[in-house]
Every structure is written in C-alpha cells, then in structure tokens.
Amino acid sequence: MTPLLQARGLTHRFGRVPALDDVSLLLRRHEILAIVGESGSGKTTLLNVLSGRLAPQSGDVLFHDGSAALSLAARGEIAVRKLQRARWGYVAQDPRAALRLDITAGGNIGERLMASGARNYAEIRATASRWLEAVEIDPQRLDDLPRTFSGGMLQRLQIAATLVTDPELVFMDEPTGGLDVSVQARILDLIRSLVRRLGLAVLLVTHDIGVARLLADRLIVMRHGRIVEHGLTDQVLDDPHHEYTQLLVASVLPA
Amino acid sequence: MQGYNFAYLDEQTKRMIRRAILKAVAIPGHQVPFAGREMPLPYGWGTGGIQVTAAIIGATDVLKVIDQGADDTTNAVSIRQFFARTAGVQTTTHTAEASLIQTRHRIPERPLREDQIIVYQVPMPEPLYRLEPSRASARRMHAMADYGPMQVKLYEDITRFGRVAVSYDHPVMVNRRYLMSPSPIPAFDNPKLHLMPALQLFGAGREKRIYAVPPYTAVVSLDFEDRPFDPVRAPALCALCGADDTYLDEIVIDDRGGRMFACSDTDHCAANRADLP
Ligand SMILES: Nc1ncnc2c1ncn2[C@@H]1O[C@H](COP(=O)(O)OP(=O)(O)OP(=O)(O)O)[C@@H](O)[C@H]1O
Ligand SMILES: [Mg+2]
Ligand SMILES: [Zn+2]
C-alpha cells in the first residue's frame, strides 16, 4: 500500500518534559492507525506535530501528496494551511471548542467548503444537508444554532464539518472521549462506517483500548514520549510483548 | 500658519508616508503600517486621509474635499481650508476640476479619470475585525488568504435575514488576493471601485494603516454566484434634480415628519440642475 504520512525522528520537549522522544512512524493510504498510551504519554503532542499544528524541535513529517513526498517544513506554512483546510481534517475531543456555536449548523458545515472556494449558496446548503443526514442529524436542523444540540449531536456535527471537503487524511484526538458511554457506541459505529465508505486514512488518538480494537488496523503504544510497541491491532492486543502494553491491556480487558 | 512646512508635515514624515503608499500600490489591498503623526485635528476627522493627502499634494494640485458627498460640512470645509492655508493650493467643489479628492464615506457620482487621485478617510481598515478581534490572527488570515470565515458571515446573513445585513463597508476582494474594507461607503458605491481609472488611496489615522487600489484594478464585492451582490438604492428620484441613478440621502424637511430624497453628492446634483432646460 502507498505511504501517505511519514514521521522521522520526531523529538519535542516542553521544558524538561520529553513529550516526544525520537518517534518515527508510517501511515499508508486508507489505513487507520491508533495511537494509545496513558495520560501524558505524548499522544496529543504527536498528533499536533503530524498535523502541522506544532513544529517539532527535531525530526520531520513527510506528506506524500501523490506527486511528491515533501516535509511539512519544506512545503511551508501557506501550503500546509491549504492542506489543513481541505485534504486533511481534524476532529477534536471537544466539539464546542472546534465548532462555532454562534453560527448555524449549515454555516459550520459550509465553512471548509467556502474556505476552499465554494461560492454557490444553494449548493453549499444542499451539501450541508446531505452531510447532516450522513451523520444522522435531521436535515431540518440545517439553520439551527449548535447550542441547541446535545453533546453527541455536536460531535456528529463536527465530523460532518470535517468530512465535507472529502479529505484523504483525518486526525482524531479522543473523538468519543467527552461523551456519555451510551452515546459513544453510536458515534464509534458512525465513524467506522464513514471511514470505510470514504476510504479515509485516520490517525486516531485514544487511551481506550476498546476504541482502538474496534477501529484500527494498526496500533502504536506510547510511553514517556516513545513508541514502546507497534503492530497489527489484533496481534498487539492479543499478544502484547512490552510489559507496559500488557499492563494497558490487562487494565481494560476483564481477566 | 506661518512656520509650518508645505502641507504641514515635515519632509521626512512625508517621505515615510510616500514609501508606505508605494508599497501599498505594489500590493493592492494589503494594509501597510506607517508611523502616523499627530495632526492638529482629532481622530475621526480624517487624520489618516489628511496625512496621505499631505504626503502627495503638490503646489499645482486642485483639491476637493467631501464628507458623505457634501462639500460644505464643517469637516469638509475645515480640511479644505487647512490645505489652502498650509499648501496654498487651489480648492474646488467640482469633481471634474479636482486633481486630488479627499473623501469620507462616498465616491463621487461622476466617473473619475486617470489624472485624478482619490484619498479615503478610513476609521477601521481591518475587514476581519468583527470576526477576529486579534490583529495578529487577522494578519495571519490575510497572509494565508484565509477568507472562509468572511464568506461564512455572508452565508449566515443570507440564511437569517434573507440578504447581507450591512449596507455599507461591504468587504471586497482586491486583485483576487486581498480582502479589503472599502471604508464606510454605501454598498451602492462599491461597483465604482472596480477598474477605476483613478488611483485610490486609503488612510487610517488611529490604526496607522495605508492601503491602495491602483488604477484599473479588479475589485469584487463578496457574494455568492446565485446570490449576487445587489446594493439597495432608495426607490425614488432626487427631489432636486430628478436623477434616478444616484445615491440618495433622506432629508427631513419640516417638523411634521415631511421627508424628501436628494442626491448625497451635492456637486453632482448641482451640475444636473444646471443642465436642466
Ligand atoms: N503546551 C505544553 N506546555 C508544557 N507541557 C506540555 C504542553 N503540552 C503537553 N505538555 C506535556 O507533554 C507531555 C505529553 O503531553 P500530551 O498532551 O501529548 O499527552 P497525551 O498523551 O495526549 O495525554 P492525555 O491522554 O492526558 O491527553 C505531558 O507531560 C504534558 O504535561
Ligand atoms: Mg491528549
Ligand atoms: Zn440630485
């Protein structure tokens, strides 16, 4: 399978904390890679560096755009911003921080379309309506403000607003982390079906081994900013080699 | 005003402002910072426009100053007198006779020519300030041409109110690159910005920014393909000259609520009346 995103020797410290310590990884097209690890292990920092939101102190991130494999640093800020606006997506844990609550659901979904040059009002609305349906929100809510939405609906709205530009790569940081357990399962099902249907590549941060097992093809396990284990999801979870992974697996799976 | 330099500002300041103007002309629609000087007028009286005018005015220029279309408001009269005294230039109220026009909130109805320059007084140069109060973030948005949020605002206006909510200072794209505030001119005037033969300079005194639209530059009002920019004009004729194609002011004519519409461009209205049989 063709490579899409590659990290080489990423290192980043906050003061004396090594949030990332010589991290390398490869994500292929259409692949779902989960990043798991305990709180503070560097998962969010890694996602921020991979998605071009944070420049690493050393190492680089290569994006294979179909014609060239160039590092984000070499592409430059404007080109990376352009990728972030359309070909990449970012789903944050807290939809309230990612969405704009003072504009309508349709305006939120339309934003990335308009940022990429869409200028037909009726077409933007039709696309936004279709995306509301795709994430199982009543299209009648198109002109409603998100502040009237439940937490689960807000997360579905964020997913629609992210996927509307048909990205090839989506970064997700604990996409079900802030939700009620009862709502989590439905959102996970939705993510799973959309991701397969659209052929997305996903970098998924989670500290929930169950989420990783449900969604991911491959898995990396982080601790203290280092990758301590990686491999196919089922292999790693069924036969963890590193003692830290054994602990992680044991702590969630009933004995 | 004995003891002042020509056009009040010292030569070093004028050179600094001219450098900012040249840069602004080279990057149409881009806001260029400049080290503004204190002027003997309060902000809001057009100190940005006055500094630009002072930096470019020459002894042979003929100056016209308008305030909301009128030559005879206190503001317009005092700026005109200021330059008559400090630069000794000739002044006029006729658009056709002027080589330099300083304006607040209007563009003259009579089309401007290549040998004319129009200077706008700008209270708020940043078109993104309502969406993005942080200047640093707004600058980044300009650098990245990140204008999606502005288009979203138009989308929201149309969705909620059926049309774009503002009728003045409607944002424009200059030369297909920079989002620009046209200053608080009525949307009715926006089409005049497009491909104008005259050089257009914009000065913001409090915010210390200069920007420009060189002659014959594309200036497009933000809109949607299927909701084209469509400025409103009061559906009336000028009560004084009968014009049906000018921007009208609504004027209260008595204390019983009587009103009439008349051209906001007083020079244009007078010229129309002179032409009447
Ligand atoms: N902006 C920052 N300033 C200082 N330290 C930071 C900053 N961001 C992260 N860190 C530190 O870097 C380390 C890695 O943090 P990171 O947020 O990447 O962990 P995480 O794996 O995402 O944790 P969690 O599961 O709690 O979200 C932690 O020790 C954290 O305290
Ligand atoms: Mg985190
Ligand atoms: Zn008239």
Image: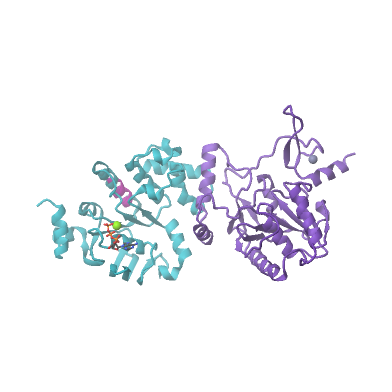
Tell me if B23 is positioned left or right of A148 in this view: right
Tell me if B171 is positioned left or right of B255 in this view: left
Residue B184 drawn at (x, y percent): 65, 48
Chain B tint in image: purple
Where, by quadrant of the figure, is residue B180 drawn?
bottom right
> What secondary structure predominates along the stretch shown in magenta?
helix
Q: How many marks?
A: 0
B78 and B247: which one is in front?
A: B78
**What span is colored magenta in the figure?**
A189-196
| A47 over B170 or under it: above or below | below
Quadrant where the N terminus of chain B sits is bottom right
Please say whether residue B247 is one of the residues in the magenta stretch: no
Quadrant where the C terminus of chain B sits is top right
| B229 over A234 or under it: above or below | above
Residue A135 drawn at (x, y percent): 35, 43
Please say whether residue A194 is one of the residues in the magenta stretch: yes
Which chain is the one coloured cyan?
A
Tell me if B153 is positioned left or right of B271 in this view: left
Where, by quadrant of the figure, is residue A44 drawn?
bottom left
Residue placed at 83% from the left, 62% from the top? B88
